[in-house]
Amino acid sequence: MLRSTLAQQGTPVYSVAWGPDSEKVLYTAGKQLIIKPLQPNAKVLQWKAHDGIILKVDWNSVSDLILSAGEDCKYKVWDSYGRPLYNSLPHEHPITSVAWAPDGELFAVGSFHTLRLCDKTGWSYALEKPNTGSIFNIAWSIDGTQIAGACGNGHVVFAHVVEQRWEWKNFQVTLTKRRTMQVRNVLNDAVDLLEFRDRVIKASLNYAHLVVSTSLQCYVFSTKNWNTPLIFDLKEGTVSLILQAERHFLLVDGGGIYLYSYEGRFISSPKFPGMRTDILNAQTVSLSNDTIAIKDKADEKIIFLFEASTGKPLGDGKLLSHKNEILEIALDQKGLTNDRKIAFIDKNRDLYITSVKRFGKEEQIIKLGTMVHTLAWSDTCNILCGLQDTRFTVWYYPNTVYVDRDILPKTLYERDASEFSKNPHIVSFVGNQVTIRRADGSLVHISISPYPAILHEYVSGSKWEDAVRLCRFVKEQTMWACLAAMAVANRDMTTAEIAYAAIGEIDKVQYINSIKDLPSKESKMAHILMFSGNIQEAEMVLLQAGLVYQAIQININLYNWERALELAVKYKTHVDTVLAYRQKFLETFGKQETNKRYLQYAEGLQIDWEKIRAKIEMEITKERERSSSSQSSKNVGLRH
């Protein structure tokens, strides 16, 4: 039954493809490609894609990328807005077929006596010349390991994807045949052969473990012992994604998301409304030792966060929501659960960082960089790297944005990235080595300084003296700046003072000195929080400790007059002090009072500075006495 005519035109439609959300249709019209939304009156996107008639198109649901092939003997890769990402060189004959692998990582190209396997970015892995005539159609098996091609000479050609390679530190694993892997240790040239009962579908090598999924089973090898893998049966055969963290790994198949330990024990299976596992990839799912993050496909501004151990939503179940659509997410790998951070790139190519722990108060989402195309966290410490426009940037301590945003530029390492050509991609960040794949498929390795990783290690073990010694030895501003931020984050103000002095931040050194002279630990804590810009938290610490005057005073110091008066009125204390400071402030600038609340409370009140100073003195004495009495009671407790 004909439901509707989507489009009518004067030229034949040689090929049609559904959009990833089944809301749009892509079709050919001579040399033009047209994306037609199914909603009535929605805007149609049309562009000239080839110099000859377009014969074949395909649209991948995972990567949202479009393939086209034409009589101009070229194949091209486009994004869903019609922007060109790759343009092949002309072949000898028209390209008669193209097809994406289900996971969107590879695609196949067919022509006269030609079958080509390509990476999603366009460059070619392999070229075969079978005696087939033109290959008119290509279909992939659901697991993405085999291709069938319909040939012009009446035959069907079958092909298998082999020679895939995985690298980690000194190990190189190659899929030599459909059911055989070769492991090579480059340190001693030792070679191991791994045989499997069924064909290999997916594999991942990281954190000293190789995880291999075949059509029926999952094998877990340790790099210390290649002879006795741990084997368990899979619920469903087609694993589309394997992600690894230090303690466990994640399998994604058509039925769900499953977390397993390296001992083969099932841990959890997170679920959320409208979950579609067939469109998840390494950019939209991230795993750390305690957290699983998944980007929502229905609303691309949202990230779901789950506890790894239970599969339940993290914290109070609040979702992480951003103002723009999110393209890529990545969780940091080290440190405590409470400090776990997630970095993500949005549609504007801005890089943001935020905490994954979401209880009640809205966590700040802070921008780290602009025009970031790809990112990766180090596997050994929380160092983040990314390719930013024409620069390769390393954020040695991204947490600096929560501690002292002013010194963030001093904690960065930057170098020119023009050598990586257009559209490079970070493959891995292991230890202090970053691997980048260029647009032509070649791999480039960059080594970054090993010292920031050692500094992270010292700080996580609270070895502050060692950290200071390391910075003195290295004599680099970036190291001192990182140490300053780390010391403030861990409330070690002595180390912070040394580090800030080393980078010439004299005003901050003076402020830290003034914090040391404060009488009570609550006051010190509040001023450390203020130093990091957490004014509300600082105020809360003081109010909870009963130091109302001190809470009012910090608002006066920050010229936060509304809040200072609000606290004084609420706690019925020091209203005259607030009014006195306000009057002094206005007199300094030669201004008249216009605030209605201040006018209301100042009516008929005589300001006596002697009396106010005496009251302030009394508050400070009271705080000192409280502090010394709590200290002596602690000592008594110790003697007991």
Image: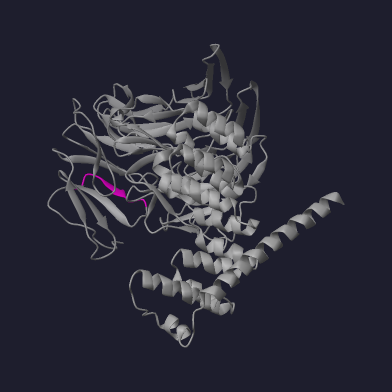
Total marks shown come to 0
- The residue closer to the viewer here, 614 or 488, is 614
Residue at (42% x, 75% y) in the render: 583
Residue at (27% x, 34% y) in the render: 422
**Can residue 208 be seen from the camera position used here?**
yes
Q: Is residue 544 left or right of residue 343?
A: right
Q: Which residue is situated farthest in the bottom direction here? A: 604
At which x and y percent is residue 150? 32, 33
Q: Is residue 323 above or below residue 382?
A: below
Q: Is residue 128 above or below residue 390?
A: above
At which x and y percent is residue 292? 55, 47
Q: Which residue is situated farthest in the right direction here? A: 640
Residue at (49% x, 46% y) in the render: 509
Q: Is residue 132 left or right of residue 338?
A: left
Q: State whether the magenta stretch is mostly helix, strand or loop.
A: loop
Q: Which residues are magenta?
A: 13-20
Q: Is residue 321 left or right of residue 129?
A: right
Quarter of the image where the N terminus is located: bottom left
Q: Quadrant of residue 115?
A: top left
